Amino acid sequence: MTWPVGYVITVAIVAWCTFFACVAPRRPNLLAKSSWLFGMIVNEVPFLAIYFLIASTALAAAEGDLHSPVGRVAAGIAGVVLVGLAVVAWRGVLSDRAVEQALERGLGADWRSRVNVTLRRHRPWLRILLIPFVRSRPDVERIKDVRYGDAGRRNLLDIYRRRNAPSNAPVLIYFHGGGFTTGKKSHEARPLLTRLASRGWVCISANYRLRPEADFPDHQIDAKKVIAWAREHGQAYGIDATRVFVSGSSAGANLAGMCAFTPNDPRFQPGFENSDTTVSGAILLYGYYGHYFGAAPAEPGSVLQPQGYFTGRTPPLFIAHGTNDGWGTVEAARHVAELARGGGVNTVVYAELPGGQHSFDVFHSPRFEAVVDGVEAFTAWTLAGQTRGVASDEVRDR
């Protein structure tokens, strides 16, 4: 009897990844990291895994591999795995509801009446189901490797904008993740950057200095430099310097949160203390909210970031975090959201995404497309307040 080796291996690999996507243990640390490593892709694009498993089973049936006892067992396991993938897919779809509820809690049930732009009514399902890996758009250009500082490649940024070069556009500045040790500006959040750019925004994705060559607060200084650069040089790219949002993922969310919590703080602006680094709002995606890695209690960076720098007032915040995140805990995200609300003084939209893990912003997934729509609604609501001449304090007081 010949074993259907190829089919068995295929089912085993998909089953292994589906387990970590579906169960997603967050403790102990080794299992949490394994959950992200093996489950992240399947968790965000389960439909492709479903297609692959069904096609593999159909091929095995056509070749007669399912007539053997081993083949039948493998097919039975494949059936169980498909159920698991369906659960994973459904949790991703439910993120739409989670984001909608977060907007109503954070902005008020009547938030749509205060938005000045037409929002997308439906997910881009064709892209989600068939081409989730394609992250470029024909109507958006990317201007690569613009220098904003003197730290070589770590001080370069990319600019995303509509090909017809909009003028007086709001700007979203994005900082990548990577634990302050790795990462680059072209990897994460591309569906968000290209979506907003197609809607007339100018989006910036920036590198910043990394460990071990840099340390705290070098990363934060670079983040502030990008804001200062956008205000000083952004007009040449169509940027309206009065409408600046910051965003980031993981460690980048930490940087964006620090920017929101420490506007014009001279500690993080050496040599450009007079530059305006205030922001209109901040978007924090699966953020790391804790002590700077390796900092001793008496060293700079030992204070919890960004919450340790909270002074009572913030610009509007949009925070999205997955319930199954094993790198940056959902409990920490909840704490930051509650702290930032400041007893109702500040506007905070906190979306807790069912089944979400770290790095949910890489592909066009149901989960991240729901977040993209939430960000667009949040920024439109914030900008509507500015357009009407409402003071920032009034917006925060909602």
Image (cartoon, rainbow, N blue to C red):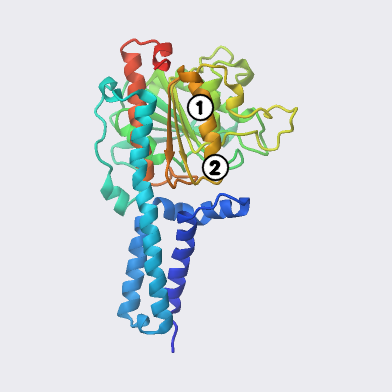
Residue at the extreme bottom? 1
Corner quadrant of residue 243? top left
Query: Do residues under tags 1 and 2 come within 8 Å of each other at their CB atoms?
Result: no
Q: Secondary structure at mark 1?
A: helix
Residue position for label 1: 338
Q: Earlier in the sequence, mark 1 or mark 2?
A: 2
Corner quadrant of residue 189? top left
Question: Vertical placement of 16 versus 211: above or below?
Answer: below
Residue 229 at what x, y percent from top left? 49, 22
Front-most of residues 66 and 242? 66
Q: CA distance from mark 1 to mark 2?
A: 29 Å
| Horizontal side of residue 318 vs 336, given as left or right | left
x 54%, y 52%: residue? 25
| Horizontal side of residue 151 vs 5, given as left or right | right
Front-most of residues 264 and 20? 20
Please tell me the numbered disc located at residue 126: none
| Horizontal side of residue 256 vs 50, given as left or right | right
Which residue type carries mark 2?
Gly
x 70%, y 27%: residue? 300
Residue 27 at what x, y percent from top left? 59, 50
Residue position for label 2: 183
Quarter occupied by the N terminus: bottom left
Instruction: Give the number of the mark in front: 1 or 2.
Output: 1
